[in-house]
């Protein structure tokens, strides 16, 4: 009777340590994911800050777009790029030789919706 009880305790202890090891591995995986996410957010914040500084130094709104700069990891740049593509399409002359200087309010509403 004592031998069976001892084997049951050893078996339960083995199962307990297996569960504890599984929880430890899961915890490390979750913490690793959070650390990666924090690094991505820090990088995006720094890129947004740099883009905003560059944007405010430009003479016109589409100057960065005209230089064909690409910053795919910057969230603000991605929004700027999408808006610039739409605005550029609305400002093109019918002759195709440049841009109009102004855009109508109606065309600007279409840009904002896209």
Image (tube, grey):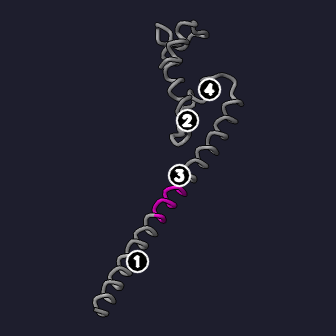
Disc 1, disc 2: CB below 8 Å? no
Disc 1, disc 4: CB below 8 Å? no
- Left or right: residue 60 compared with residue 34: right
Q: What residue span does the magenta drawing correspond to?
A: 27-37
Label 4 to label 3, Cα distance in Å? 32 Å
- Left or right: residue 23 compared with residue 48: left
Disc 2, disc 4: CB below 8 Å? no
Q: Quadrant of the N terminus?
A: bottom left
Numbered mark located on residue 63 in the image: 4
Label 2 to label 4, Cα distance in Å? 10 Å
Does 32 lie within the magenta span? Answer: yes
Label 3 to label 2, Cα distance in Å? 26 Å
Numbered mark located on residue 69 in the image: 2
Residue in the image at 38% along x and 81% along y: 13
Residue in the image at 50% along x and 9% along y: 93
Q: Earlier in the sequence, mark 3 or mark 2?
A: 3
Q: Earlier in the sequence, mark 4 or mark 3?
A: 3
Q: Earlier in the sequence, mark 1 or mark 2?
A: 1
For mark 4, give the secondary structure.
helix
Q: Earlier in the sequence, mark 1 or mark 4?
A: 1
**Which marked residue is nearer to the observer: mark 1 or mark 3?**
1
Q: Position of residue 35 (x, y in %)?
A: 55, 57
Give the labeled residue for mark 1.
17
For mark 3, give the secondary structure.
helix
Q: Main secondary structure of the magenta part?
A: helix
Q: Residues within 10 Å of mark 3 (few under 14, many from 20)?
A: few
Numbered mark located on residue 37 in the image: 3
Q: Is residue 9 above or below residue 71?
A: below
């Amino acid at each position: 009777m004592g031998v069976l009880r001892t084997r049951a305790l050893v078996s339960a202890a083995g199962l307990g340590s297996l569960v504890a090891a599984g929880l430890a591995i899961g915890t490390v995986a979750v913490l690793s994911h959070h650390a990666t996410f924090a690094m991505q957010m820090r990088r995006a914040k720094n890129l947004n800050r740099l883009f905003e500084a560059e944007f405010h130094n430009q003479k016109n709104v589409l100057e960065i777009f005209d230089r064909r700069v690409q910053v795919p990891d910057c969230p603000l740049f991605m929004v700027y790029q999408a808006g610039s593509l739409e605005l550029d399409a609305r400002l093109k002359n019918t002759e195709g030789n440049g841009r109009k200087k102004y855009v109508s309010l109606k065309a600007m509403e279409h840009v904002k919706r896209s």
